Amino acid sequence: MRKFLFILMILCISACQSKQVIVPAVVHNVNTTQEVVVEKAHLPIIGEVEPIYFLPMKSPFYARIDTGATISSLDCKDVEYFERDGEKWVSFKLVNRKSKEEHVFEKKIESAYRVRRINEDEHRKAVKMDIKMGGETFTATFTIADRSSFDYQGLVGRNILTGRFIVDTSTSYTLN
């Protein structure tokens, strides 16, 4: 019985000693995680629907925030493709559904994207747009699309979200 208690005591002591060795590593990992959170904490938190301004327009478009979309998309009307100085360009009209403000843009086509849809893939042209979102003004790539059947005229994808925002889908309209 004494041998059993002695072995049990040795096991308990060795277990306690090994925990003392492990604890600093765990604390170190927790601190590392907190440092990552602190670094990301400066990013604004946005919801599943947010306003976005397409400059020089004055009224916001409401865009669906989609972390699954690689590229952002924009609802365009009267789309016409043409050539200018040997390069491919596009002319299109943006009409804000709520304010009725409209503006005609002429943009150089930057690239083409294959957008995966449920029924079939679409091939879309993409342009760079000057936008304002959350107090920050920057240029971002948008594909030109007919989004008239969608609730929101814009779709903001990872090309805009990455490094700029943290998305919380339980909220909306967090930006001014």
Image: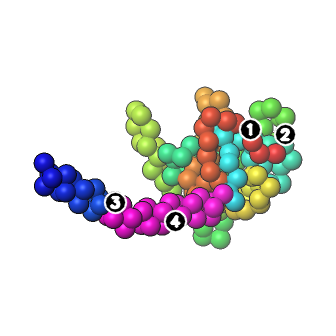
Residue, disc 1? 173
Residue, disc 2? 101
Q: Residues within 10 Å of mark 1 (few under 14, many from 20)?
A: few
State the residue at coordinates (70%, 53%): 44
Q: Could you give the CA–CA distance between mark 2 and mark 3, rounded to whole angstroms?
A: 70 Å
Percent x, y of residue 170: 62, 34
Tag 2 secondary structure: loop
Does label 2 or label 3 sit earlier along the sequence?
Answer: 3
State the residue at coordinates (49%, 45%): 68
**Mark 1 belongs to which amino acid?**
Tyr
**Mark 3 belongs to which amino acid?**
Cys
Image quadrant where one finds the C terminus: top right
Main secondary structure along the magenta-highlighted residues: helix
In the image, residue 32 sits, relative to residue 8, either above or below, namely: below
The nearer-to-camera label among 2 and 3 is: 3
Q: Could you give the CA–CA distance between mark 4 and mark 3, rounded to whole angstroms?
A: 25 Å
**Mark 2 belongs to which amino acid?**
Glu
Does label 3 or label 1 sit earlier along the sequence?
Answer: 3
Give the residues drawn in magenta, as a range.
16-41
Residue, disc 4? 32
Q: Could you give the CA–CA distance between mark 1 and mark 2, rounded to whole angstroms?
A: 20 Å
The nearer-to-camera label among 4 and 3 is: 3
Extreme residue in the front direction: 2
The nearer-to-camera label among 2 and 4 is: 4
- Where is residue 161, by image quadrant? bottom right
- Can you tell which mark lies on residue 16? 3
Tag 1 secondary structure: loop
Labels 4 and 1 touching (C-beta < 8 A): no
Q: Is residue 144 left or right of residue 172?
A: left
Tag 3 secondary structure: helix
